[in-house]
Amino acid sequence: MLIANHIGKEHEDIGWAVGDAIYEYLVKQGKTVEDIEKNPSEFAKLVVKKLQEREVVGPTVARSTQKAIKEVIPATIKLINKMWPKDHSIKHLRAMKEAFSPDTKDPVRALKAAGIDITKELEELRNTIAEVTGKRPKAAKKTTRKVAGRRKSKLGKRVEENEGETPLALEAQKLLGILNGLKYAGYPEDGLKNLERDVEDKFNELLHSKDFEILTLYSILLVLLERKRLKDAENFLEKFARS
C-alpha cells in the first residue's frame, strides 16, 4: 500500500520486490525482525534496491521511497508483532493461514475470531501511511477464488490431506521422511545439498502464495539446513508432524 501510494501507481512487481527483500534479509542474511526494528534504514535500503532491480522505481524517487519505507516500519512492526508475537504457537500459524486463505473475504475478522485483534495496529499503520504519502490507502479487497490443481516442485506433489491430519503435519512428515533417509545414510554431502536446494526452490515457489503455514515451515527448515543444524531440523519437523 505504501509503495503504490508513494509512487502513484499500482505495479505487479511491488509484492515480488518486497518478498525478495524479506527473503534475502531474513533467510539469506539470517537476520530477524528485531534487526529491522533496530536498523530500519538498512532494510528500507534493501527494499528499494529490489524495487530498482525490478524497475518499479527509478533513481529520482529512490531516496524518497527509502525514507517513506523507513518511516512506516515501526507501525508495521507493531502489526507483525500482534499477528506473530514472540511467544507464538500453532494457534497463530493456523490463524494466519485462515486469514490469508484465498477463500477468506475478511482477514481482519478471521484473525479476531481466532483471538488476534489487529484493528488498532492496522489503523495506526494506515494513518502512518496517510501521513507519509498524503493519501489514505484503500482497504485491500479479498476475492474468493478456487485453486485448480496442486502445485508441483522438486520435492514432489503436495501430500494429499488425510482425515484427521492437517496439511502442515503431512508436509512435515514428508520432509522428515527425506531427512531421516539422509540420516540413516550418514548425511551424504550431495544429498544434503540437494535437499537444501529443493527446500529453497519450494520456499521461493510458496513465497507469494497464501499457504502461510507451509511457507513458515519451509523458511525455518531452510535456515536450519543452511546452518547445518540437522538435529534441530529433525526436532522441528517432528513437532509439526504431530500437530
Image (cartoon, grey):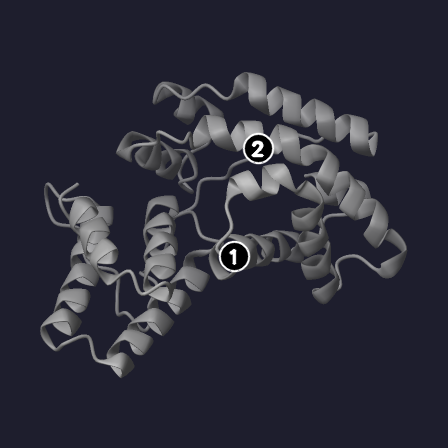
Comparing 51 with 99, the one in front is 51
Q: Disc 2 residue type?
A: Ile
Q: Position of residue 154 (x, y in %)?
A: 32, 73
Which disc is residue 23 wearing?
Answer: 1
Instruction: Identify which amino acid the numbered label 1 is placed on.
Output: Tyr
Q: Residues within 10 Å of mark 2 (few under 14, many from 20)?
A: some
Left or right of residue 105, residue 61 in this image: right
Q: Is residue 138 left or right of residue 192?
A: right
How many numbered circles does the render carry?
Answer: 2
Q: Nearer the viewer, residue 37 or 198?
A: 37
Which residue bears the numbered disc 2? 77
Q: How many neighbours does mark 1 have within 10 angstroms: few (below 14), some (14-19), or many (20 or more)?
A: some
Residue 73 picture location, percent across and down: 65, 36
Name the spot of residue 225 as percent of width and height, x first.
Answer: 32, 64
Judged from the image, the secondary structure of the residue bearing numbered disc 1 is helix
The quadrant holding residue 98 is top left
